[in-house]
Image: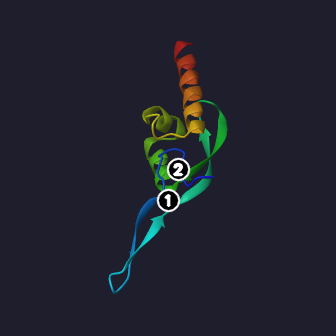
């Protein structure tokens, strides 16, 4: 399982440990990923995703999972999130047409 946020695409970053003597050794910075259950209002069900804490705050700020998915481009989303976005868009178009 890769260390990538399913909603924001945030992954690991590479940098250096720098000692007092200014020696540099490679290291990685991993995102703070959490397994969370988010509720989709349009679908009426809960979805388990692996999301960074920054992504979780962004979802709450935008107003929920459905709004986040509809406003985010497909490039950053994981395959599961893209499928979920397709379902939400389909359900939203059905409710507008009715």
Q: Nearer the viewer, residue 54 or 60?
A: 54
Q: Is residue 47 above or below residue 95?
A: below
Residue 84: mark in rendering: none
Q: Nearer the viewer, residue 52 or 20?
A: 20
Q: Nearer the viewer, residue 61 or 35?
A: 35
- Kindly indicate whether the residue at mark 2 contacts the one at mark 1 (C-beta within 8 angstroms): yes
Q: Position of residue 3 (x, y in %)?
A: 56, 55
Mark nearer the N terminus (1 vs 2):
2
The answer to which quarter of the image holds residue 85 is top right
On screen, residue 39 versus residue 27, left or right, reads: right
Q: CA distance from mark 1 to mark 2?
A: 8 Å
Q: Residues within 10 Å of mark 2 (few under 14, many from 20)?
A: many
Q: Position of residue 79 (x, y in %)?
A: 57, 37
Q: Nearer the viewer, residue 32 or 89?
A: 32
On screen, residue 43 versus residue 56, left or right, reads: right
Q: Which residue is mark 2?
A: 5
Q: Which quadrant does the C terminus fall into? A: top right
Q: Position of residue 20 (x, y in %)?
A: 35, 86
Residue 31: mark in rendering: 1
Q: Residue placed farthest to the left in the image?
A: 22
Q: Position of residue 35 (x, y in %)?
A: 62, 53
What residue sits 46% from the left and 69% below the top?
27
Q: Residue placed farthest to the bottom in the image?
A: 21
Q: Secondary structure at mark 2?
A: loop
What residue sits 43% from the left and 34% below the top?
71
């Amino acid at each position: 399982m890769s260390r990538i946020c399913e909603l924001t695409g945030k992954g690991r970053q590479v940098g250096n440990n720098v000692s007092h003597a200014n020696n540099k050794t490679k290291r990685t910075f991993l995102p703070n990923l959490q397994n969370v259950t988010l509720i989709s209002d349009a679908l009426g069900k809960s979805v388990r995703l692996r999301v960074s804490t920054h992504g979780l705050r962004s979802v709450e700020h935008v107003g929920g999972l459905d709004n986040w998915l509809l406003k985010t481009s497909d490039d950053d989303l994981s395959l599961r999130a893209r499928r979920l976005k397709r379902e939400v868009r389909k359900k939203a178009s059905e409710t507008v047409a009715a």
